[in-house]
Amino acid sequence: MMTTRVQVPLPKPISFTDIAYLFLSLYRFFTYVLAVLLIQVIPLDGPGEPGLQIYIIIGLVALYTLFKVFSPLLWRQRYPMVYAVLLFDIVASILLLMFTGGLDSAFLLYALTPIITASLFFRERVALLAAGLLSLPLFMAHVGLSQLNTDFSWVMTGNYLPLLIIYIICCFLIATLPYRTNLNIRQRIESSAVINERMRIRRELHDGVAQALGYLNLKTKQVRASLSSLKTDQAMAGMEDIQKVLKDTYEDIRQSIDSLSETRSLPLIATINEYAMEFSQRTGIQVIFDLPKGKSIERLSSMADLQILRMVHESLNNVRKHAEAGTVWISISHDGRGIEISVRDDGKGFSLDEHWRNSSGHHGLYILKERAEGLSGTCDITSRPGRGTEVRIRVPAQKVRL
């Protein structure tokens, strides 16, 4: 019989980093074009054509913009060099404003780029620090000079002071608003996650414990009737069935408890290895855990850790319930594109076509597929009667790394 394969086709995901780079590139480009247009309409050197100095500045800013757009830095990697590059960007923005008129500069919006960068890729305190570093020189240049030199007293009498205050407020708002927005989004995600988790637990209770209790209720009535009729053999057979169902129900509850354990302090690989050992001791099924030596899984997000762990739990639970296997092989591999998890057994296997047609009340494979889709991944299931089953799950790197 031919092997049947089921694959969940999913589009290639676009990572947050890609979207952020695109936004920053477009922002730099359009604010630069806007500044050039403003300089042509309102020359910084006064009435008439712009002077040579401003054209040199425009050329240098154009080269700097191209460099920043086509040589993006991996901000997520939090190396010291990343902070140095951000600081250089802040200093460049300050010098640009100072040499093009301060609050009269056409590059006011362009100079906000390092603050936006910090708010997208760094912690809130770094973004606030960037806003402070950019605002302080402007404040000192306009307000400080007006106090030290009477030639600059016009700053306090014109519209410059309100404009300065508005610009500084905008700097700090840009630095902190993304975090307030992210807080609201996170609360919505957590609320949705709670609802989905409740639905999953409801399915598991309905498919496992509820059905087992219903069966046990019916079986105990049959055993009582057999004992009343002195049919000892039938009563003993019924008791053996009851004992088997109780054991399976106990394992289901243990599985549910393990899947709800979100506070393990061990790394993902160590956690899976520990659970595999516990699974082997409880079920008597040998588990062989394969991780290529010399390679370590990069640090993952807590959500990816949890979902991958639960997918392994669900795969092993399916083996215990249905496979009648003697050995299970678990392997985890990764490359630059993503992480792949394989759970393979030497059990009795099954026909996937028949399973999908008659899967009422059995949601194990659907749950695996849903979890893989939740990480923008794919789920391949290979099985045939008498040749075991393999579940192969792959999730893209953009979704699993911090």
Image: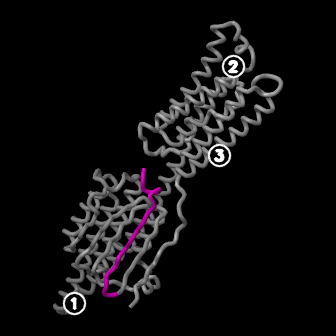
Identify the amino acid type marked 2. Leu
In magenta segment, residue 37 = no
Residue at image location 28% in from the left, 52% down from the top? 266
Q: Note whether 221 is above or below 178 in the view shown.
A: below
Residue 77 figure quarter:
top left
Q: Nearer the viewer, residue 143 or 70?
A: 70
In magenta segment, residue 401 = yes
Label 1 crowd (10 A; few <14 / some 14-19 / many >=20): some
Identify the amino acid type marked 1. Ser
* Total count of labels: 3
Residue at image location 46% in from the left, 45% down from the top? 76
Spatial CA distance of label 3 from label 1 is 79 Å
For marks 2 and 1 on the same chain, the one whose residue lies earlier in the sequence = 2
Q: Which residue is mark 3?
A: 26
For marks 3 and 1 on the same chain, the one whose residue lies earlier in the sequence = 3
Residue at image location 56% in from the left, 41% down from the top? 178
Q: Which residue is mark 1?
A: 226
Relative to 251, 72 lies left or right: right
For marks 2 and 3 on the same chain, the one whose residue lies earlier in the sequence = 3
Residue 331 figure quarter:
bottom left
Q: Nearer the viewer, residue 255 or 174?
A: 174
Label 2 crowd (10 A; few <14 / some 14-19 / many >=20): some
Identify the amino acid type marked 3. Leu
Q: Which residue is mark 2?
A: 161
Residue stretch in magenta = 385-402
Kindly state the secondary structure of the residue where label 3 is placed: helix
Relative to 321, 18 lies left or right: right
Q: Nearer the viewer, mark 3 or mark 1?
A: 3
Q: Nearer the viewer, mark 2 or mark 1?
A: 2
